[in-house]
Image: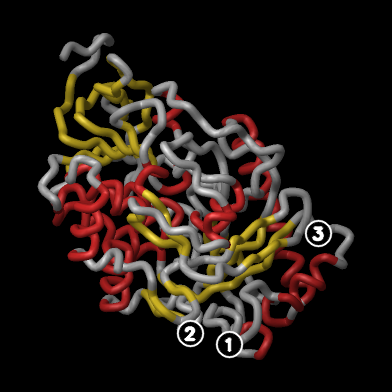
Amino acid sequence: MRITRDLPLKGTFDLVVAGGGPGGLGAAIAAARCGLKTALIEKNSFLGGMASAGLVVPLSGFYHNGVRVAGGIGWELVQRLIADGAAQIELPKGHVSYHPEYVKLHALRMAREAGVTLIMNALLTGCQMEAGRLTHVFFAQPGGEAALAADTFIDATGGASLCRMAGAEMLPAPESYQPMSLCILLEGVDCSTPLLSGSIHHDGLHGHSSHAEIHRWLAAQPDAPQFGGPWFNSLIRGDLLAVNITRSGGDGADDEDCAAVTARLREDAFRLTELLRRGFAEFKNAQVAGTAVNLGVRESRRMRGRYVLTGDDLLHQRRFEDTIAFCAHPMDIHLPDGNGQKLVDLPAPGAIPLRCLQSASVENLLGAGRVISCDGAAFASLRVMATAFAVGQAAGVACSQGMDAARTRDVLARQGAIT
């Protein structure tokens, strides 16, 4: 099939995955292990998405009420991190504290071991359609622009970039999205006192994960910018502390909005650190040692799939014939215009059907990660990284099984991804 733009064709594949975060990583590795010739396009020079570039620690969503419900490729990565002394399962709640640099290392190893063709430092620039199907994607690297051809494509870009380029039907945008954050790394923090010694391990034994005492103090400061949490987390190796504290409303799919929010939150990272130094002896020597490469976008555009999963589906424990994954995390809704957060626990792990991964309008396009087809309430549970890994792995396996849900479940069960 001829490319309609004058670009070199860099390869023809069974599957092309756009985005190397948890969803895309799970999809590409799973598909390659199932025998598909698979390429993964990633904008950074490393893999891991929010788990690495975003500094979003811990990994959440593997456990529900002390029982692990997510496994597969995401759990394999956790086990590799633990073996390297770079992760710890915070039981009984089950969050996984980890070091982001080791995610970069082991994610790359897993993709290469599976035989995934990696297209790194690459930005999507467009695509080609024919008779309602995607045939090519275009991307730009420092060496120039090129194209890949494939039978099937998975959009795991977070912002649904490929879906929008392909003209896929999207779900309506809500009145407001969950706020964005820019996670930071702090050095020089004294974690030995009662203020922080328990709260840097999100095991559920020390109350809510966000730090209530520090939250109250910051909320009372007239010069404090908008903030969330805050959440402090051990990286297991070394003395750095991962901190999720900055917050700003905005549209995560709007380039100008994201640029403005990123600039504001980089300023706020230093302002909030200075406030912590002023208010608490444990932070008197604290310094910003690093900030996330990528803005933490909690919510943006989602495609319309063959089914739109709802919050009621999760709360009423609806089951589906084509269930391919489960979500375990509470509905976690951060308020865009304040410092608050709303949590709604799921009564049982929520079922996710294959149809939520399949575009309703582009025959050979699937979504994974934040792109999945669901309403805002369901998304508030689905958006965490353990679920993104599970959904991505299911998408990759489904591509190898002709989108047959029963066969996909059988393969996922053999891979330890679903029970």
Q: Is residue 60 visible?
A: no
Please give the name of the residue rendered at 45% of the width and 77% of the height, measured from the top-left corner: 94
Question: Contact (CB < 8 A) between labels 3 and 2?
Answer: no
Residue type at tag 1: Leu
**Tag in front: 1 or 3:** 1
Q: Which residue is mark 1?
A: 205
Relative to the observer, which residue lies in front, 395 or 254?
395
Query: Which x, y percent locates residue 314?
Result: 53, 59
Name the secondary structure under disc 1: loop
Specify whether 187 is left or right of 414.
right
Residue type at tag 3: Ala
Q: Which residue is mark 3?
A: 224
Name the secondary structure under disc 2: loop
Question: Contact (CB < 8 A) between labels 2 and 1?
Answer: yes
Query: Which x, y percent locates residue 72?
Result: 27, 64
Specify whether 221 is left or right of 200.
right
Q: Which residue is mark 2?
A: 92
Specify whether 177 is left or right of 80.
right
Above or below, 307 relative to 227: above
Q: What is the residue that sits farthest to the left in this orientation? A: 35
Above or below, 202 relative to 352: below
Residue type at tag 2: Pro
Q: Residues within 10 Å of mark 1 (few under 14, many from 20)?
A: some
To which quarter of the image does residue 366 belong?
top left
For marks 2 and 1, give the CA distance: 8 Å
Lower sequence index among marks 1 and 3: 1
Please give the name of the residue rendered at 36% of the width and 26% of the height, measured from the top-left corner: 362
Name the secondary structure under disc 3: loop
For marks 1 and 3, give the CA distance: 29 Å
Q: Is residue 249 visible?
A: yes
